[in-house]
Image: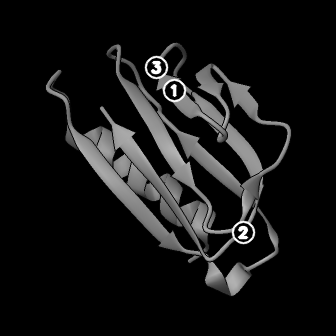
């Protein structure tokens, strides 16, 4: 399963599992060493309604780097250089940004 799909599925599962307003934080680390030096895409979605929001922050690329430009749809905004926010402004909310793969990709998800 590719990295893009893993990250998308992880975010979708986490967003579906927690409906409360309590702060929930997950630290995610994906081994991208197989793709070292390759251009990859980071894609996350938050779909549905209910006023949900997710913050992705503290990105670390293990020798890689985010590339331009980020592409957003609906309630998605941000940049991998700082943080990404997803809000259920529309039914479909999507963030995509290319990055140059390093040894790993690490980031924090806050609900």
Front residue of 40/105: it is 105
Of the numbered discs in the image, which one, if any, rests on residue 4? Answer: none
In the displayed orientation, state which residue is furthest to the bottom: 34
Figure quadrant of the C terminus: top left
According to the picture, the residue beneath numbered tag 3 turns out to be 88
Q: Position of residue 93 (x, y in %)?
A: 57, 28
Q: What's the residue at 54%, 39% (across, down)?
A: 45
- Report which quarter residue 92 is drawn in: top right
* Above or below, 110 relative to 88: below
User: Mark 1 and mark 3: span between their CA atoms?
Assistant: 10 Å
Front residue of 51/99: it is 99
Asked whether the residues under the numbered discs 1 and 3 touch, taking CB atoms below 8 Å apart as contact, a structural biologist would say no
- Report which quarter residue 102 is drawn in: bottom right
Q: Is residue 23 left or right of residue 73?
A: left
According to the picture, the residue beneath numbered tag 1 turns out to be 85
* Above or below, 95 relative to 31: above
Looking at the rendered structure, the number of numbered marks drawn on it comes to: 3
- Graded by Cα atoms within 10 Å as few (under 14), some (14 to 19) or many (20 or more), the crowding at tag 1 reads some
- Graded by Cα atoms within 10 Å as few (under 14), some (14 to 19) or many (20 or more), the crowding at tag 2 reads many
Figure quadrant of the N terminus: bottom right
* Above or below, 87 relative to 14: above
Q: What's the residue at 29%, 50% (across, down)?
A: 26
Q: What's the residue at 51%, 13% (across, down)?
A: 89
Query: Circle 2 — which element?
Result: loop
According to the picture, the residue beneath numbered tag 2 turns out to be 101
Q: What's the residue at 40%, 30% (across, down)?
A: 54
Q: Nearer the viewer, mark 1 or mark 3?
A: 1
């Amino acid at each position: 399963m590719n990295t893009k799909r893993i990250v998308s599925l992880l975010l979708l599962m986490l967003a579906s599992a927690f409906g409360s307003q309590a702060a929930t934080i997950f630290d995610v680390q994906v081994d991208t060493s197989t793709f070292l030096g390759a251009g990859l895409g980071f894609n996350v979605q938050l779909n549905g309604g209910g006023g949900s929001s997710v913050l992705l922050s503290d990105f670390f690329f293990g020798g890689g780097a985010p590339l331009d430009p980020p592409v957003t749809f609906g309630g998605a905004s941000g940049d991998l250089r700082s943080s990404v926010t997803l809000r259920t402004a529309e039914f479909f909310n999507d963030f995509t940004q290319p990055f140059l793969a390093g040894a790993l990709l690490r980031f924090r998800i806050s609900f």
